[in-house]
Amino acid sequence: PPLRVRVRRVLQMASTAGAAGGVARAGWSESVPAGREEVPGMRAHWRAGDRSDTRIGMSGVTMSASGWIAGKAKRDQAATGCPPNLWLIHGSLYDLSSYIAKHPGGPEWLQLTRGTDCTAAFEVHHLDEEKCKAILAKYFVRELPSDVRFKADPYVWDEQGFYKTLKRAVFQHIKKSSATKSNSSNTSSLATGPSREMLALTGVAVGFWVASFAWLCMSGSVVAGFVAGLALFSLVGLGHNFFHQRNTLLRYVWDLTLMSSHEWRVTHALSHHLYPNLDLDIEASFVEPFIFFMRDQPTNHWLVLVYAHLFLLTSCFIDAGRRAAECLRASTRHEVRPEYALPLV
């Protein structure tokens, strides 16, 4: 059946199961369970002119990925007592140091989340919960006290709530689809990466950009520049797909756009995707006070229809300039990564 029909079926399954199992959900709620702090305040400290929020332990808005990671670690450790060398998941501490090299998604995700509450990242990126929890149990250290164990997590992960019910339904659907295609009921046949069709299309897109860029270099014509620009734009979507996944060389096509796949793993995958429109969403907050996305700022001036597009058109140059300045400024101690040179090659 078409994709829209399959999505509708999965949502119906989840909705039915969720209605039968209860109304609790993973998400922002007016009611806060015992031992869990209020969800961060939607940039309220910006409006009040106070650029510090004592509840989350982060000062102002940082535009750097390293600053966001450091700020979140400081916040989580202050709120829960999580040691800087352990990982906090669902209120329990784990020592995954010896598992970093074995992690199927690559070592970088675990290195970035060490010393933080990474419950949201664990939930969002692992469909096969039984398998993942069995692995996680091998590295269990201890549970945190009940009065602090959930203080750094803004979500309620109710097993019978909508999110968890939908997640199980999606997993069963993908599992069934994969088994049908491989004529096997073994979960090891579960598709865990891009399809052959996707890889073929990616190869065509990258090849087209290489060819158009070579044409531009040899001819110097405006037409060639226009075509090469359009080809590069297609790599933005492809790079976005691959930096969300395990490490592959294809993630670095994102770096050809003057933006960093490493930093976007933090600002986009770990911040924006996990905490949309909360204070921890760096992508939605760093454009304030020019563009407002937060709950406490529901409207923008009509001129946003003009300058928002100008900002988007120049964002890659702004990001590259910021990163270059941070690399040159000794006080920031910004890591210089080899892929930063890709746009210069």
Image (spheres, rainbow, N blue to C red):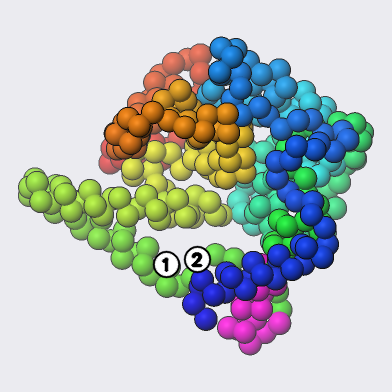
Residue type at mark 1: give it: Leu
Residue that badge 1 annotates = 199
Name which residue lies at 59% across and 14% down. Answer: 48
Quick one: 318 or 200, which is closer to the camera?
A: 318
- For residue 331, side relative to residue 22 (left or right): left
Name which residue lies at 38% across and 70% down. Answer: 200
Residue 211 image position (x, y, % from top left): 20, 58
Q: Main secondary structure of the magenta part?
A: helix
Residue 120 in view? yes
Quick one: 200 or 158, which is closer to the camera?
A: 158
Name which residue lies at 35% across and 64% down. Answer: 203
Eyeballing the image, is 3 above or below 284? below
Which element type, helix, strand or loop, lies under badge 1? helix
Highlighted range, magenta = 170-185
Eyeballing the image, is 224 above or below 64? below
Residue type at mark 2: give it: Pro
Q: Is residue 319 magenta?
A: no
Residue 56 image position (x, y, % from top left): 70, 24
Find the distance from the CA under tag 2 to the CA under tag 1: 6 Å
Q: Earlier in the sequence, mark 2 or mark 1?
A: 2
Quick one: 306 or 115, which is closer to the camera?
A: 306
Which element type, helix, strand or loop, lies under badge 2? loop
Residue that badge 2 annotates = 194
Where, by quadrant of the figure, is residue 151 drawn? top right
